[in-house]
Amino acid sequence: MSPSKVCRSLMMLCALAPACSSETVEMPPAAPVYWRPADLATASPTTPTVKERAVADAYTKALASPGFGELGSLVDQDARLVFGARDTRGRGRVVKAHDDMFGAFDERHFVTSHIWLTDSTGLPNSQAFEWTMTGVQTRDWLGVSSTRKPVVIKGLTLLWTNDDGIISEIHLYLDEEVIKAQLGKGPADLQKLPAPTPPAGPPQISERNGTEEETASVALMRATLRALQNDNEASFLSTMADDVEVFTLDRAEPARGSDSARAYFRTTRKSIRQLDTAIQNVWGIGSFVIVEYSINGLQIAPLRRIPFRAESALHTLHTQFVDVAAIRDGKITRIWRYADPITFVSQ
């Protein structure tokens, strides 16, 4: 039985059985990742190799290569790509998945704006990088016919490599609806968004040093997500600076200040019952924390771009995120949030 069918069956049993607590409904699992204990996820780093440091540049250049011909040599035979509900394994399939995502755009050019380097002893080496792609849509893409329109796509990628710099796993984050809006499709408010501005100059590079401050920053991010799960508004706001800014791909300007953070908390809690946050990966890197996590629960009201179908008796929500948070003086001052396409399991 598939995971979604198992999830639906469990929730139906709980709905029918009065002795089953509403807090025990099993949520759908997050996208498969490298699961690791918290102590290993924040272990003291070793120094990335020269090949590992070159991976981000080699990967983005391969994505710009004709027919993605340079990509195959960078990925392991059993490499894996995770993007939203897509979960692909094997070198050929991973290359094909990149072609499906980016191959409809000619004149592809990728610019990396920030690279976060980390490493964990005894585990696959990991890094994250933020990139911007420019191109022109010359073929059909995810149901959108060729428009010949230019696009500017911003995204974030998590990579795991071995010591030789060969990629073993890729987690890709971008917003498909925002891209479709640039092509004249989708919600009108998204079509009004200005295209991202490609960065100029070399990328900023941050590297994990294994300091106490990095460990404290990871604990701060864990506390933020735990407070959201536990419906503790005061604890949630206490982790953030009064002038915190939250940047997302679907807004031209960031949400600013404590009032915006409070509104996000209350809207999320109001819209999702049995809310659960699950951290898959988290790293403290210099003055930044990168956390990959999911929010799961039963949707009971509209939530931003996620409609609510009142006719559905059970509407289970699973959303995957990566937050890049800047930390100063023990507070979160900025968050750059990347979200995968939303996945539902509904009755």
Image: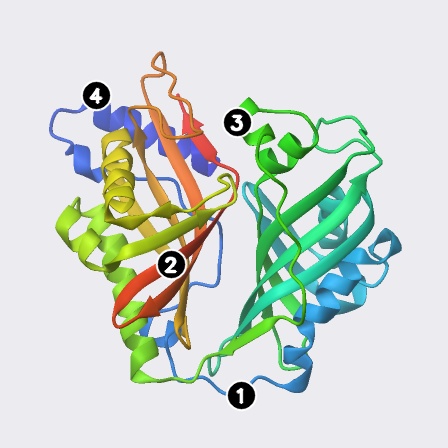
How many residues crowd mark 3 within 10 Å: few (<14), some (14–19), many (20+)?
Answer: few
- Give the residue number, with chain letter if any, for mark 2: 334
Q: Earlier in the sequence, mark 3 or mark 1?
A: 1
Please tell me the numbered disc located at residue 16. 4
Disc 4 versus disc 3: distance between alpha carbons?
Answer: 41 Å
> x, y percentage for residue 265?
25, 42
Disc 3 versus disc 2: distance between alpha carbons?
Answer: 24 Å
Q: As rendered, which of 310 and 266 lies closer to the eye?
A: 266
Residue placed at 70% from the left, 52% from the top?
133
Residue placed at 12% from the left, 24% from the top?
18
Disc 1 versus disc 4: distance between alpha carbons?
Answer: 54 Å
**Helix, strand or loop for disc 4:** helix
Please tell me the numbered disc located at residue 189. 3
> x, y percentage for residue 12?
29, 24
Residue placed at 71% from the left, 26% from the top?
143
Q: Earlier in the sequence, mark 4 or mark 3?
A: 4
Q: Is residue 273 visible?
A: no
Q: Nearer the viewer, mark 2 or mark 4?
A: 2
Give above or below for 14 relative to 70: above
**Helix, strand or loop for disc 2:** strand
Q: Are marks 2 and 4 in contact (CB under 8 Å)?
A: no
Q: Earlier in the sequence, mark 2 or mark 1?
A: 1
- Give the residue number, with chain letter if any, for mark 1: 47
> x, y percentage for residue 148?
83, 33
Amino acid, disc 3: Asp
**Helix, strand or loop for disc 1:** loop
Classify the position of the C terminus by image quarter: top left
Q: Earlier in the sequence, mark 1 or mark 4?
A: 4
Disc 2 versus disc 1: distance between alpha carbons?
Answer: 27 Å
Amino acid, disc 4: Leu
Numbered-mark total: 4
